[in-house]
Image (cartoon, rainbow, N blue to C red):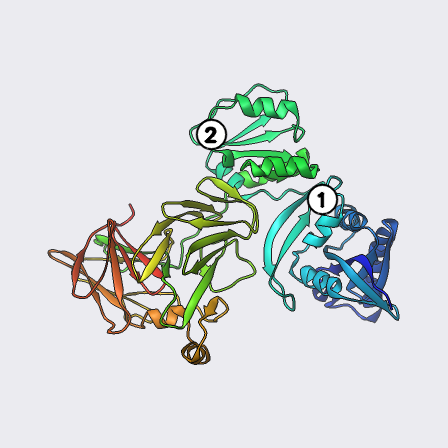
Amino acid sequence: MSTHTRTVVFTDLANYTDQLVGKDRDGVRKLVADHEKAVVPVLERHRGRVVKNLGDSFMALFDSATDAVRAGVDLVDRVTADASFTFRLGMATGDVEEIDGDAFGEAVNLASRINAKCPAGQIWFSATTLMCMNQSEVGWESVGRYSLKGIVGETQVYRAVPMQRCWLPDPIVAALRGGRLVRIVRGQPLPSLPPDPVVLLEGFDPGSAPLQEVVDSLPVIDPAALWLAAFTIPPADRDRWTRGGHGLVIAQSAALDRALRETRRPPAHTSSADTIILDVSGTSVLELVMSGLALPAVPMSEVVAGYSYDLLSDGRWMNRSDQGVGRVDVSADGVRFTAMAPGILVAGQQLLPGETVVLRGGENLQVPSGLISFVRLNGRAYMGLMVADTLSRLGIAPGQVAEVGREPNHPGLALPDRRGQENIRWCVGSRAARARESGFTLDRVLAGRHQAAIQLGPSGATVSSLHDRCPTYILQGDAFEQVVTPRGTVPGDFIVTGTSVIAVREPAS
């Protein structure tokens, strides 16, 4: 029995269950038949072979990775426009064994898992498919790294871009809405540049002399602020451009124009339920603002050898998430940050998904939720802080006492209580084993239900520790010290407890 290298494609009919609602048996049979009529001819036209039909999904095999991706693009680009169906497709390339009309192997499992993660109307594929296909024939971009069920480690996943689609990177969206995006189109006069511009180059062939001439004519700007709009790019030109620290927007010109028009309309803003205002009379003179992630030093008490936290696009930190855009990893020899999605900048340098940098202190990270600053701490308790304001804040008026903790008394600011141990690398030994079995997590062990109190009195604000085993710290300028007895605090200070950073601020106007 032999195996062959194949590209495995899973197609899935989005909202299949919803479409069944209200249909009788004839209606169900017609839906299945129409689905097959829409999908199978497209797969076969690109030399694919359907080996399994599950009603709402198909599994097909392709000898060519390029044919497989082009079939997916064709299906989404053309059939979706003509039919009442929306598809998702997942692909992977590798050894496949065919037995009695079915297919087996790691590539089959991987394609199935990628398809399960893929949003409706998109085509996602594995790094093995990318390496095997002709990358100059299809528009493609990275969508990040994912933990997939049954697949060891994390998988880098890519997306094929149909001709009518454009997914704008977050830095382009932010620049457009902030009035800092400058579009430079080949053959048109160079526009004036605003302060801190983000430049989008359009109509230039990657690697061409005209592109280089325009780049050379620009004033000195951050390399990460230079983006090229292109669709199909030879691998060498893509690598040369991105290794220079520049960004790519994968799109045809019409799709790019449409995406920019739609993005220019700002989203509706609503008041946040996370914002807590205690002083309803408007006399609050101090705010406590949840402001990021504190990174305890390791190794920790012969229990934790290292750990990581995943950053979500909305700025929250989680123990582990397959929707993360970045990951901070702490070990005894330092702090590292890994980009898990495109569009991440560290110290002005754009990171490719999967690329890791060492954080040494003072770096700014540009992420989808905004700017994160890394503050290096050289004490035995903490290695650093990942600082960025959130909407979770608490106003304090004169005479009030506010609590901080996992379950604080009112009025209080609740600390995150992240469950799960997937982010912990354990030390070896019985002590670590007991901690693991008892449900040890950094958030629960390092911060108590009632952790600290901040009081605003006639002579100013003071912070006091409420827990006899979980210490509270304060960062005032460059001085980082444990709060043993009540001590004064002023706007600009940071209170650090557990894995949380709380900024002391004047109320926002």
For the question of whether residue 265 can be seen, the reply is no
Where is residue 89 drawn, in percent x and y?
73, 56
Q: Position of residue 292 (x, y in %)?
A: 38, 56
Foreground: 169 or 282? 169
Q: Amino acid at mark 1?
A: Pro
Dot 1: few (<14), some (14–19), or many (≥20) neighbours within 10 Å?
Answer: many
- Residue 195 picture quarter: top left
Q: How many marks?
A: 2
Q: Residue at x 41, y 44 (%)?
A: 364
Q: Which mark is residue 162?
A: 1
Q: Quadrant of residue 334?
A: bottom left
Residue 160: x %, y % from top left = 70, 47
Q: Secondary structure at mark 1?
A: loop
Q: Amino acid at mark 2?
A: Ile
Query: Any mark on residue 221, and which?
Result: 2
Front residue (pair 422, 407): 422
At 65% from the left edge and 69% from the top edge, which residue is drawn? 150
In-front residue for pair 18/313:
313
Q: Are marks 1 and 2 in contact (CB under 8 Å)?
A: no
Q: Quadrant of the N terminus?
A: bottom right
Q: Is any atom of residue 183 visible in this view?
A: yes
